Image (spheres, grey):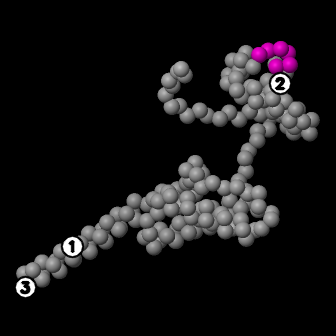
Amino acid sequence: MASMRPNEKKSKTCLCLEEKLVMIRLSESGMSNVEIGRRLGIVRQTVSQMIMSKEKILNEVTNATPTNTKRIRRRSSLIADMEKILTVWIEDQTSCNIPLSQDIIQFKALALFNTMKAKRGQKASEEKFEASSGWFMRFKERSRGGHEVPSTIYLTILQDYGRVALLFTHIILCFVSD
């Protein structure tokens, strides 16, 4: 039976080529993956992945890539353009006092992405996008104000509802008293 661990979010490690080369050299010297992991403070699975992709790493080194280079995942221009349009749409909806939720924003993002992908044709056919909650959280971070559902919108709606309810109550009382 597996041991019960509390749910802990593991952080991803980003290793530079130099660190990967050290792992490969230690492995070639006969050190086990567990020993390498302990020595470098890295989990065994990461060491194993680096050893398995040894040829790819050595190829990067021979192509004169600086060894302290770290890979950075870049968002495609299609996704960046979609996010710009989405930001304008959110601002428009907010200015019209239309309440937005995370689900609505994610749905709109996916719809915009698919529309833009279709318009761009063949060059965008490989692009993939999932309007996941992780994407949404990163989108909020990238955006200026963070597109949380504005509480002021809900407050405005509640105030309007309160005014209507008060007016409705007043009208009913006028009819009842007549």
Badge number at residue 178: 3
- The dominant secondary structure in magenta is loop
The residue tagged with tag 2: helix, strand or loop?
helix
* Nearer to us: label 3 or label 2: 3
Q: Please check the rendered image and state whether residue 41 is part of the magenta-colored stretch, yes or no.
A: no
Q: Position of residue 21 (x, y in %)?
A: 83, 27
Confirm whether residue 123 shows in the render.
Answer: yes
Residue occupying image coordinates x 9% and y 80%? 176
Residue tagged 1: 166
**Residue type at the position of mark 3:** Asp
In three-dimensional space, the C-alpha distance between marks 3 and 1, rounded to whole angstroms, equals 19 Å
**Residue type at the position of mark 1:** Leu
Residue occupying image coordinates x 51% and y 25%? 5
Q: Position of residue 82 (x, y in %)?
A: 65, 64
In three-dimensional space, the C-alpha distance between marks 3 and 2, rounded to whole angstroms, equals 92 Å
Q: Position of residue 35 (x, y in %)?
A: 73, 15
Q: Who comes first in sequence, dot 2 or dot 1?
A: 2
Q: Are marks 3 and 2 in contact (CB under 8 Å)?
A: no
Q: Who comes first in sequence, dot 3 or dot 2?
A: 2
Residue tagged 2: 24
